[in-house]
Amino acid sequence: MRGEKHLILSLALAAALFAGCETSRKVVPTAQMMSLKFEDVKRGSVTLLFDVEINNPYAVGLPLTNLSYVLTSGTNTFLQSSAELQTTVPASSKEIVSLPAKVNYKNMLKALKDASPGSKIPYKAELELSVNTPTSGLIKLPTFGGEGELVLPQVPKKVKKEVTKTRTPDVIFVPTPQEVVDKMLELVDVKKDDLLYDLGCGDGRIVVTAAKKYGCKAVGFDIDPQRIKESLENVEKNNVGDLVKIEQKDIFTLDLSEANVITLYLLPRLNVKLIPQLEKLKPGSRIVSHDFDMEGVTPDKVITVTTSEGNAEHTVYFWTTPLRKEKKEPVPVQN
């Protein structure tokens, strides 16, 4: 009887051990390589992406810590290195993850000898993946791999940066008094659906005022980087960045046809230089200038603004398109 009990107990223990072995076998992570491709190709480097299917049997996430790889083409080993990983496979899941490894593209091409960018090569990959398990800590999974063909990426051509030559400003910056700015915008009757261009925007006070007071879109142009900096600071300070843009441009190269309000504080000769561009504005567009007229073009209105500071007088000129050119009297011919 005692012998039978001993036998039953032994069988039970053996069964438990066998079941334990079976359970431990089930909780070992597995990895299988699915594909290999190139990404983020630069002149000096390229990123290899190993697409690997990971089976995580644990009830917690499985961190992947390191990938070691050897790549051969025929008898030629052209890559052999490792990459640190910062990827975690979700709990109790089977996921295909892309594992990146950055390599020196020039050295890789040298190791391939006869291969060149754009050519196709056969490859064989051997991978070893380190993972951090909740039961055994840091372990290496059994070596796995795959084989196939790779198209070597073309090296991007070096793009020459265009150097933009910037002219010196045509005028010295003198800010328009705020009272004059308000009168200029009132005179051109700014509406919410207008698009205003300020040519030579200085510190951006005209475009900022137009956006804040009338809610219209406005673009300030200036050739001077210091003025651009000041304008951008003004836009940010007044929180009108959704309506106002500031661009460093030569105003004499601009297409003004999209705007229907133009503001100016330039010299008379510069206003005249702008006439060919202003003539392309849509009919009914409005132009306003502080202090300086436009020789050869009759204004619709001219007003005087006296500022409270210094009791100074400022003239404001207003035109609408099409511009009314002044007729020149013919010069009599002397016999």
Image (cartoon, rainbow, N blue to C red):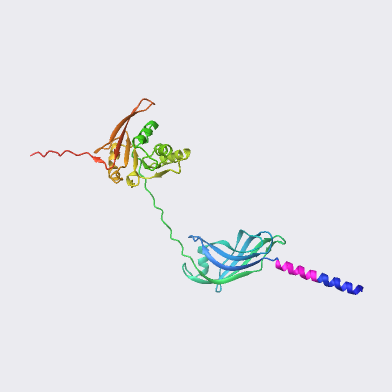
> Which residues are the magenta region?
15-26
Question: Observer-nearest residue: 119 or 9?
Answer: 9
Decide: is 323 above or below 158: above
Prevailing secondary structure of the magenta residues: helix
Residue lying farthest to the left in this orientation:
335
* Residue nearest the observer in this picture, 71 or 241: 241
Q: In this rendering, would 251 be left or right of 2?
A: left
Left or right: 156 as drawn, with respect to 8: left
State whether residue 25 appears in this view.
yes
Q: In the visual, does 325 lie left or right of 2?
A: left
Q: Residue furthest top?
A: 311
Instruction: Identify the residue at image location x=29%, y=33%.
Output: 302
- Location of residue 257 in the rendering, given as x and y in whole percent from the top left corner: 33, 47
Tell which residue pokes out farthest to the right in this image.
1
Residue 123 placed where, x, y %?
Answer: 55, 71
Q: Where's the C terminus, which quadrant?
A: top left
- Is residue 265 a member of the stretch shown in magenta? no
Q: Residue at x 38, y 31 (%)?
A: 179
Image quadrant where residue 18 sits: bottom right
Quadrant where the image shows the N terminus: bottom right
Instruction: Give the image location of residue 245, x and y in percent.
Output: 42, 44
